Image (cartoon, helix red, strand yellow):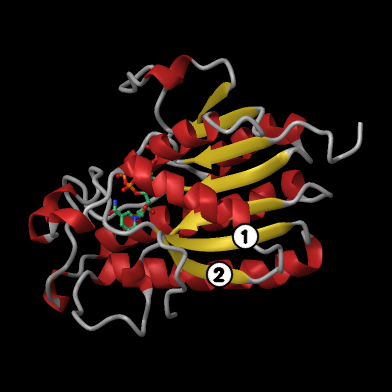
Amino acid sequence: MTVAQQSQTALVLGASGGLGQAIVAKFLTDPSIERVIAVSRNCQTDDLSAAWISNSRLIWIQVEGDYSEDSMTKAVADLVPFTGTISRVCICHGLLHADDIWPEKRCEDINEASMHAVFQANTVVPALWLKLLLGVLVGQQPCVVAALSARVGSIEDNRMGGWYAYRTSKAALNMMLKTFAIEYARRVKNVKLISFHPGTTDTDLSKPFQASVPKEQLFATAFVADRLAGIMDEAEMDGQLAFIDWDGKQVNW
Ligand SMILES: NC(=O)c1ccc[n+]([C@@H]2O[C@H](COP(=O)([O-])OP(=O)(O)OC[C@H]3O[C@@H](n4cnc5c(N)ncnc54)[C@H](OP(=O)(O)O)[C@@H]3O)[C@@H](O)[C@H]2O)c1
């Protein structure tokens, strides 16, 4: 079987969040994708009641604990049989708030433990995936990898201040992706990396901050998943990192 004839696999990492679920559902509607592999801390039967959860093209991999490098390495071992077939990867991890974490309004709100937790989810976990996946992505199969970033990680765009941990973890994610793009261009030439800003989207992550967002600027997850899938379909395999938003427009670094 030639590579062109091989079945294609889409991989969604951090799949049980609002955008993760919508992206899984979107890929399952694409006939060119033979299987969708969703990776999450959550067992698929925990909270997910969507009809697509029983789709026979969906493979669910549960990562133990909070994405330790060991548990991620075990998940990647399960992906080895799909080496050379992966054409889409979405890295959907993100943390803005939790029971004991809240975005900082002023510098006195900076908290050591919160900052570590936010950086772990937003920067460290995506970097570990890109390290661990290198061996299963390398080959002839063109593959587009999108990491969900945020416009607030743009240094040029920062006019409001605040949200220290979230902003800086996304800026660090962007630099991490840029550095990976340089190494991947040498070692994994079949991969294109995208840093993607979804826009304000109706998920648990944005819920506490939606009141100030005009209705037309608050997107449904299915709309954003549609946009992202289209952007990935049209991505130029140029070995460069693109920082783009839901509308396909470039975001300033
Ligand atoms: N919603 C928005 O308005 C908005 C705007 C800009 C950017 N974004 C970005 O879009 C991405 C998806 O966000 P969402 O809105 O879908 O949020 P969400 O519903 O809260 O989902 C968050 C995702 O992050 C993962 N996650 C949560 N805590 C984690 C931790 N401690 N360590 C590792 N992973 C963790 C979860 O994976 P499991 O499946 O393992 O639970 C989950 O899939 C994030 O990167 C976010 O920053 C969202």
Neighbor class of circle 2 (other Cα within 10 Å; few <14, some 14-19, many 20+) is many
Camera-nearest label, 2 or 1: 1
> In terms of sequence position, does the residue under pointer 2 or pointer 1 come before the other?
1
Please name the residue that numbered disc 1 is placed on.
235
- Viewer-side residue, 22 vs 115: 22
Asked if marks 2 and 1 touch (Cβ < 8 Å), the reply is yes
Picture coordinates of residue 167, whole percent (x, y): 31, 70
- Viewer-side residue, 200 vs 139: 200
Question: Could one spot residue 40 in this view of the protein?
Answer: no
**Amino acid at circle 1:** Ala
Which residue is outermost to the left? Answer: 211
Picture coordinates of residue 176, whole percent (x, y): 54, 68
Q: Which mark is residue 126?
A: none
Identify the residue at image location x=8%, y=55%.
211
Q: Which mark is residue 242?
A: 2
Question: Could one spot residue 103 in this view of the protein?
Answer: yes
Identify the residue at image location x=61%, y=51%.
233
Picture coordinates of residue 46, whole percent (x, y): 34, 20
Picture coordinates of residue 120, whole percent (x, y): 41, 56
